[in-house]
Image (cartoon, helix red, strand yellow):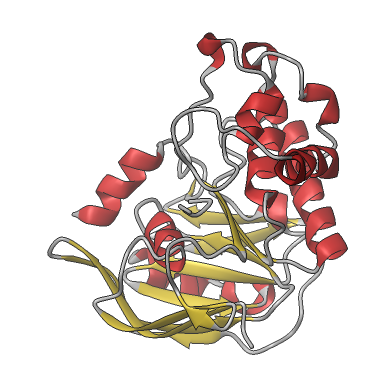
Amino acid sequence: MTAISFDQVRLSLGKRVILSDVSFAIRPGEFIGLLGPNGAGKTTLIRAILGLVAPSRGTITVMGAPASRGNRAVGYMPQHRKLASGQGLTGWDFVASAVGGWRWGLPTLNATEREDVAWALDTVEASGLARRPLGSLSGGERQRLLISQALLGRPKLLLLDEPLISLDPHHQQSIVDLVMRLQRQFGMAVLFSAHELNPLLNAIDRVLYLGQGRAVLGDVETVVTAPILSSLYGSPIEVLRLGSRIFVMSGGIEAETGAHQHDHDHDHDHDHGDRHDHHAAQCVGAVRHDA
């Protein structure tokens, strides 16, 4: 069984084709970095895995079943998120609000559900945030609560859409380390969308790069090359390796530098209109869930 499988998938938003004839397979327990230029379709791909965007062609399977809404094997952290800090909510309230799926209002939890919330908070080392007001939390602390929400139900697949946005390098590394620990501790597959590769280099098994309606899945050394990225970006790309860091350059400017300067809606609008395993790259084709 694969964690995620795309077989000749075409994803469209309106009349615009976002991904065309895409095929790849992610194994259970793999940590995959999802990258690509702004508007390449990263958020749309994640929404398709959640069953929120139906393919116009091809099939998507998730943990051995067709992609569908409400798959309890899938935990999801969306890119576009607002924590209602002005409504007197605590960290506990925020995580508890996601029990049973995303919905308005605070649910009345039974003993088992309260235990699940406590477990999720403890698992991300956020128990100390439970009684603190949301407005008093730092960006890194809020990200921990969002990951805690995604863990409710103890999923086998974790989808994280740009969790490093707006975090400084220290907090970025803290979040990557946390997700890597969760992946290893629970054997979860992780699809981690990011605007640049470097924060993920020590965590990922393989990288899934999107661009120009195509995708390439493979180890970093095979995928992150000038010929492949030039094809995916649709313009000449140079890949520079300086020590342990990799820089993707376009016309002498780092191509990934500004890729995160957008929120979910902006990315959606665009869609509209050191651990590597050495498998050959797969070159493929020219929320937390609702309950």
**Residue positioned 63% across, 89% down in the render:** 280
Q: Nearer the viewer, residue 218 or 118?
A: 118
Residue 224 visible in the shown view: no
Seen in the image, is 286 located left or right of residue 154?
Answer: left
Q: Quadrant of residue 149?
A: top right
What count of labels does the image hold? Answer: 0
Q: Nearer the viewer, residue 81 or 208?
A: 81
Q: Quadrant of residue 171?
A: top right
**Residue positioned 71% across, 72% down in the render:** 30
Position of the N terminus by quadrant = bottom right
Q: Nearer the viewer, residue 213 or 188?
A: 188
The picture places residue 27, in percent across and down from the top left corner, at: 67, 81
The picture places residue 78, in percent across and down from the top left corner, at: 50, 45
Residue 203 visible in the shown view: yes
Seen in the image, is 39 located left or right of residue 180?
Answer: left
Seen in the image, is 214 located left or right of residue 279?
Answer: left
The picture places residue 260, in percent across and down from the top left corner, at: 48, 41
Q: Nearer the viewer, residue 239 or 87?
A: 87
